[in-house]
Image (cartoon, helix red, strand yellow):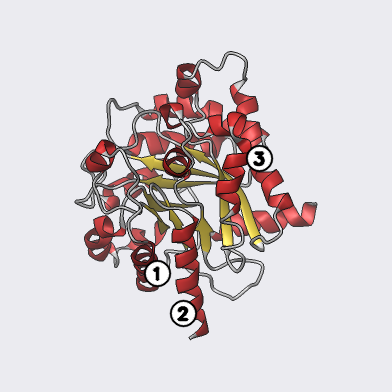
Amino acid sequence: INLKRKIMEEIVESLREPTLKSKDDKIPTIFLTYGGTETSLIFEQNIELREFCAWEAVLKHADTLKEVHSKFLPIAENYGFIMDAPTWRASPDYYEKLEMENENLNQIIYQCIQHQREMLANALKKPKHVLISAEIGPRGDGYSIESKMTISQAENYHSAQIMALVASKVDMATALTLNYADEAIGIALAAKRYHLPIIIGFTLEVDGRLPDGSTIEDFIKSVDQATDQSPLCYILNCCHPTHCDNALRTYAHTPWFNRLRGIRANASTKSHAELDQLDHLDSGDPYDFASRLFALHTTYPNFRILGGCCGSNHIHLQAVADRLSLSSSS
């Protein structure tokens, strides 16, 4: 058990590295992730998710969630896999909104983690290297900023969820769809305080900037400076690769660029505002999706985490794995 824990810690820490210096079978070069869990449940499984809270599916539709997630495990058989529990909105505000009087939030978070562990244990085909992670989402809307917290407010708010994740013994956490630096700083400081390794994921608009107008450079440098570079790394998420192409080319040769480790992309090229108006799923083109993620990985070798967000599912990630495999064999 201690040896396994040590190996997991080494794999987690390897995410700090832009590229791996040696080909060690214990440390995966590339990590895949899930697709858009919430959009798959809502549009493909016809499950109502109040306030976009996928953790409620663990309580009410555990078998369906298992069906959605288990399709990803054999896809990542030859890669590392970051197995994020659906806790994106398992935080105090959303717990109160859903009026879960008979359920304790800490217990809900624990159940989400256990759901992933049990699914992994029962899988016939699975990745060699799996990190049990958990999602942390913004306090407000991921697409728009209704009000901003101070760093201190963000640290206090997110500490409850982070403490519950630590108690559940996850390997790490992934903050997703953050849209301004102060909240990211608060999350990173809370994770640092409770010794939880964390990836910071943030979203971009079609112009390649965060919803608050800041650049990728502004965001990463602000968070790293305020936290003494405590996050493992950063990823882009909930945006299409076409939204970040120009920005990535602009910053590719700057020193901080190697703090970026990948992307969890939307399947659709639409803007956040356009996606909010849709009453159906825009799943885009899985093969174009795969080609664009592969292109990002080959152009920027530090992009070692490749995965999906809204509108994507196991078909998209299968296409990504196939494209990676084709490259490896050629």
Instruction: State yes or no: discs 1 and 3 in contact (Cβ < 8 Å).
Output: no
Q: Quick check: 208 left or right of 315?
A: left
Quick one: SS at disc 2? Answer: helix
Q: Is residue 37 above or below residue 110?
A: below
Can residue 211 be seen at all in this image of the molecule? no
Residue 219 picture location, percent across and down: 31, 46
**Callout 2 crowding tier (Cα within 10 Å): few <14, some 14–19, many ≥20:** few
User: Circle 1: is it few (<14), some (14-19), or many (20+) Cα within 10 Å?
Assistant: many
Q: Tags 1 and 2 in contact by the CB under 8 Å rule? A: yes
Labels 2 and 3 touching (C-beta < 8 A): no
Q: Earlier in the sequence, mark 2 or mark 3?
A: 3
Residue that mark 2 sits on:
327
Determine the CA span between mark 2 and mark 3.
Answer: 34 Å
* Observer-nearest of 181 and 76: 76
Say whether disc 1 or disc 3 marks the residue closer to the N-terminus: 3
Secondary structure beneath label 3: helix
Q: Between 283 and 195, which is closer to the camera in this rendering?
A: 283
Q: Position of residue 208 (x, y in %)?
A: 23, 52
Residue 149 in the image, given as x and y percentages of width and height: 34, 26
Disc ID at residue 115: 3
Q: Is residue 58 left or right of residue 291?
A: right
Inter-mark Cα distance, 1 to 2: 9 Å
* Type of the residue with mark 2: Ser
In the rendered image, the vertical position of residue 112 relative to residue 81, given as above or below:
above
Residue 162 marker: none
User: Which mark's residue is nearer the viewer, 1 or 3?
Assistant: 3
Name the residue that disc number 1 marks: 294
* Along the viewing direction, whichever of 170 and 216 lies nearer the viewer: 170
Residue sitting nearer the eye, 270 or 216: 270
| Dot 3 amino acid type | His
Label 1 sits on what residue type?
A: Phe
